[in-house]
Image (cartoon, rainbow, N blue to C red):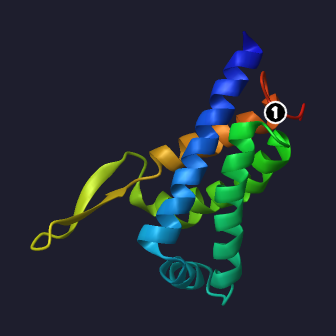
Amino acid sequence: MSPIGATVLRVMLGVVFIAHGYYIYDVVSSDALSAMINRRLGLPLGDYVTLYILFAHFLGGIMLVLGIFTRFVAMANLPVMMGAVLLFHFDQGFFLRGVIIDAARGKADVVGYEYALLVLAATLAQCFLGSGALGLTKS
């Protein structure tokens, strides 16, 4: 049953990464993420890091769903998820909670590193597990 468990984890991680890639591209915008990264790192690397995140999430997510080079793709997403936990969510506290940003416009945001940490742990587990059953490659 272990190969089936690895497959379920692989496919779900792929779906999550594809969805996050879409969210960054369409909702947050590449420019906004680049600006946030530049502020957090204090270096003008935001454009490059954003491009890496989009490729790791979109292309990597598709490869995870298909089970192609699973360990490599999971390793490519590890720094993205570590950055999400440590640079963006850690100072917000562990538990997820809603924070109202603009009550008049009905805007709220979810803060906390609980979810990002779970995705990071699942990605690390996928590095060790490999493709599982039904992957197109064995790694």
Q: What element does badge 1 sit on?
A: helix
As displayed, is residue 44 above or below residue 82?
below
Q: Position of residue 33 (x, y in %)?
A: 52, 76
The reply, left or right, for residue 138 in relation to residue 123 is right
Query: Relative to the observer, which residue lies in front, 121 or 132?
Result: 132
Q: Residue at x 80, y 30 (%)?
A: 135
Residue 48 appears at what percent x and percent y? 71, 80
Q: Residue at x 52, y 61 (%)?
A: 22
Q: Residue at x 66, y 88 (%)?
A: 43
Task: Give the residue furthest to the right.
Answer: 138
Whole-percent x, y for residue 42 in the image: 61, 86
* Quarter that holds the N terminus: top right
Residue drawn at 81 percent across, 33 percent down:
128
Residue lying farthest left? 104
- Quadrant of the snapshot with the C terminus: top right
Which residue lies most toward the bottom here?
A: 44
Residue 99: % across, % down: 25, 60
Task: Check the image and report above or below for 22 versus 63.
Answer: below
- The total of numbered circles placed on residues is 1
Dividing the picture into quadrants, the one containing residue 87 is bottom right
Q: Which amino acid type corresponds to the residue marked 1 in the rendered image?
A: Phe
Q: Residues within 10 Å of mark 1 (few under 14, many from 20)?
A: some
Who is closer to the viewer here, 128 or 89?
128
Q: Nearer the viewer, residue 85 or 6?
A: 6
Q: Which residue is mark 1?
A: 128
